[in-house]
Amino acid sequence: MKFLSLSLFLLLTGMGSLSPCQAALLDWTGKTWNIGSSNNQSFMQNTYALDGTAGNTVTITISHTLSYNPFAPYPTTQPTPQVGTRHAGGLNPIDEALQLHMDFQNRGEFVLVNFAFAQPLAGLNFTIFDIDNASSFQDQLTFQGALDGITSTALVNNLGSAVRQGPNTPQGATVLSGVANAPDTYGSNPGTTTGTQAQTGNGNGSVGFVGNINNLTLRYSAGDRGPANPSTQGISIYDINYLAAVPEVNTAWVAAFCCVGAALFQWRRKRLISESSPS
């Protein structure tokens, strides 16, 4: 029995040496987005360390199946996607985010942004800036988070006055749509002489997930409240926060638990037989 007690002690203290959970984020400040050289910018992929932690990464893939390049430059000569401060989301001071500036040719067209996390994440949440609707376009975003293909319930909060949730998709994906105009909220308009503009969070939408997830898909589309041929439209994806990275279960520890459990069962069984045997 002393051996079993020692084994359990070592096992439990060994489990305590697994990598601890830690709060972290993907902070866009100082980062760049590499567009690559795919046809019509139809496939772009970049990998970033989360909070600088080795092995804890996110691979972001932006793709589409359109016959043309739907990404519009901003300003007139700078390709997008790009990291910048065009949409400030009411932050003061302003901060950088991943900007998507689109020129869709038809209502309903979209691009996909996929986030693949190397480790499952608990408490993931993030905010989109400048979701809105004008006479010439409508921003519409559809979110789906999952853990190994099993979807996780999304929680939406802090919606600006220009944003509405729903109706969600039959598959349970969360939909945010612009319903009013939220003027661009950059603190300083790059490439122009218009100067500083007012800060506002009217186009903000924050999304989080109840369970652990290791994959997130965002579809950014030209909404059905816009014209048949929308004008340019844009959003920014702000920093991705999460409470903890969930370490993978080490199969050696699982096997050790099974061995200790089996030994304990056998010891208990032999003792009961011994106690029930006539002396």
Image: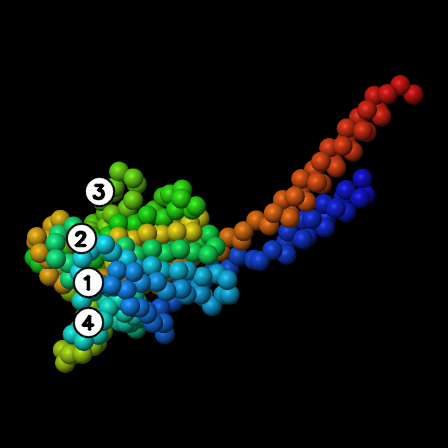
Q: Nearer the viewer, mark 2 or mark 1?
A: 1
Q: Which corner quadrant holds the N terminus?
A: top right
Q: Amino acid at mark 3?
A: Pro
Label at residue 74: 4
Q: Residue 190: horizontal and vertical position, in percent? A: 20, 77
* Residue occupying the point 36% across, 60% down: 60
Which residue does the numbered mark 2 point to in the structure image?
A: 109
Q: Nearer the viewer, mark 1 or mark 3?
A: 1
Q: Secondary structure at mark 4?
A: loop
**For marks 1 and 3 on the same chain, the one whose residue lies earlier in the sequence:** 1
Which residue does the numbered mark 3 point to in the structure image?
A: 167
From this viewpoint, which residue is outermost toward the right?
279
* Residue occupying the point 33% across, 55% down: 114
> Rounded to the nearest whole Å, what is the CA distance between mark 2 and mark 1?
12 Å
**Left or right: 43 with respect to 110?**
right
**For marks 4 and 1 on the same chain, the one whose residue lies earlier in the sequence:** 1
Does the image show residue 169?
Answer: yes
> Rounded to the nearest whole Å, what is the CA distance between mark 4 and mark 1?
14 Å
Q: Are marks 4 and 1 in contact (CB under 8 Å)?
A: no
Q: Amino acid at mark 4?
A: Tyr
**For marks 3 and 2 on the same chain, the one whose residue lies earlier in the sequence:** 2
With respect to residue 261, does 65 lie above or below?
A: below
Q: Secondary structure at mark 2?
A: loop
Q: Amino acid at mark 2?
A: Glu
**For marks 4 and 2 on the same chain, the one whose residue lies earlier in the sequence:** 4
Q: Amino acid at mark 1?
A: Asn
**For marks 4 and 3 on the same chain, the one whose residue lies earlier in the sequence:** 4
* Residue occupying the point 76% across, 44% down: 5
Q: Residue 154: horizontal and vertical position, in percent? A: 34, 46
Which residue does the numbered mark 1 point to in the structure image?
A: 69
